[in-house]
Image (cartoon, rainbow, N blue to C red):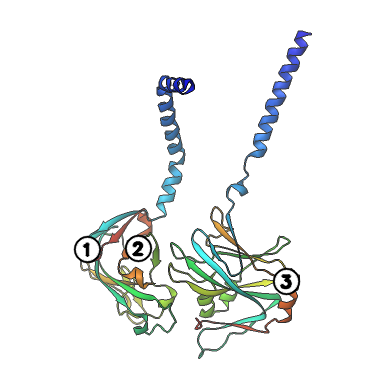
Amino acid sequence: MNVMKSLHRWLRAQRGWLVGGVLVGSTVLLWTTWDAWRDYARWRPLRPADVAAGEGGMLGGAEWRLGSVEILDPKDLALGRRVPDDAVVLVAHYAMTPATGADQKLLASCDGRLSDAKGRHWEEYPIELSRLHLGEPRGCVAELSADAGIRSAPPGAPWHFAHAYLVPSDVALGAMPELILPKLQPRYLRFQRR
Amino acid sequence: MGKARSVATSALWVAAAIATIGALVNLRMNYDSKLAPFLVSGRIGEAVVARAFVVTVGTVELAAATSAQDDPEEITLKSLSSAGVWVVVHLRLDARLAPISLLTANLQTSDGYAYAAAGPRVQGAGNLAYSRKLLNLKTTQPGLANDGLLLFEVPRARLAGLHLQVSQASGGAKLDSLADIDLGIDAAKAVDLLEHIAPLLTVRGDEP
């Protein structure tokens, strides 16, 4: 009992030093690892900016809007490939309107992703969907085709494009489409669905 | 007498301090062990759970040559032979969090040699079947497990004691988990496998 009492007394007497030590320690730790943390965040989408259903989100000097989201049965799509039995194809339709003077190259670097509540995510257009034809461009800014060359939206008008995903059927209903511009990480857009 | 004693004591303290510093320096982790992968061991037929994926090795077979065919209508590629033997590992891969490929895929021999899975060379043979079936080239997405294979060229004399090591991280899986699976090949099994070697294994892109 005596030991506890004297320990308590010692802790009280040294309170200032102990608190100061913790403060100095954490400052030093943060200071010395700050660059590493910044580098880590620079290459990873860590900070989602949630976009409410039906609204547009700003990223890289353009407004991005999620239109409809379709869930399709792979059997109806003539994929020419066997896909896992419980998989479905989710198609997210987007409209992108660049502000005047927006960096087209930056916008064209956009990546699509689909994430679920467990933090898992899926890539747009996996190899199983290589023969999928949606009749809508895949590129975020323009489309390059053999017959028509480069096609993009006229200034001020929205550009419509779509991202397709292959996901387990139980994920399709709740998953959220996301758009990432790698250079602007860690921030990215996460769209709520209707 | 007293002076000599105090000098001896000081010398002893200095020696003790040097020995302690030396021991601490030797104990300090070197760069390789600091970045070493986290080994997750398993055996053939077991689901081995790594940080980013779950892998289950099904069967192992040998082939003298490999080829690929993407569609039944397409022509079959010219076969690739080997100075040793092709070890074909059939496995199932499931991603846990994000899309992955097995960027590190090696067969480790009992005497310390590592043989990397065939990738660019067979891919250079230009057939989609390889990128659809070889799990070091193909991307596997969460919840959509892939049944595929890995191809290795190994000398005939080094089959016994092979371990498969796979990871989603490249460059030896530094600071990430590395699944290490004993393929269960002892000397007798190696002889048996060599006796039943398939003359040609064709990787088919349209097979499940």
Q: Residue at x 40, y 27 (%)?
A: A19
Quadrant in the picture for residue A95: bottom left
Near mark 3 (Cα within 10 A), the count class, few <14, some 14-19 or many ≥20, is some
Seen from the viewer's position, the closer of residues A106 and A23 is A23
Chain bearing tag 1 is: A
Q: Does residue A9 sit above or below A46 in this rendering?
A: above
- The amino acid at mark 1 is Ala
In the image, are marks 1 and 2 on the same chain? yes
Above or below, B98 relative to B3:
below
Query: Can residue A106 be seen in this snapshot?
Result: yes
Q: Residues within 10 Å of mark 2 (few under 14, many from 20)?
A: some
User: Distance of mark 3 from mark 1, alpha carbons?
Assistant: 59 Å
The residues bearing labels 1 and 2 have C-alpha atoms spaced at a distance of: 16 Å
* Up-down relation of residue B80 to residue B119 (above or below): below
* Residue A100 at least partly seen: no
Amino acid type shown at disc 3: Pro
Q: Residue A164 placed where, x, y %? A: 35, 73
Q: Do residues under tags 3 and 1 come within 8 Å of each other at their CB atoms?
A: no
Type of amino acid at the residue the image marks with label 2:
Asp
Location of residue B159 in the rendering, given as x and y in whole percent from the top left corner: 72, 70
Question: What residue sits right under mark 1 in the picture?
Answer: A53
Q: Quadrant of residue B77?
A: bottom right
Numbered label attached to residue B155: 3
Residue annotated with mark 2: A116
**Nearest to the observer: residue B124 or residue B179:** B179
The quarter holding residue B69 reads bottom right
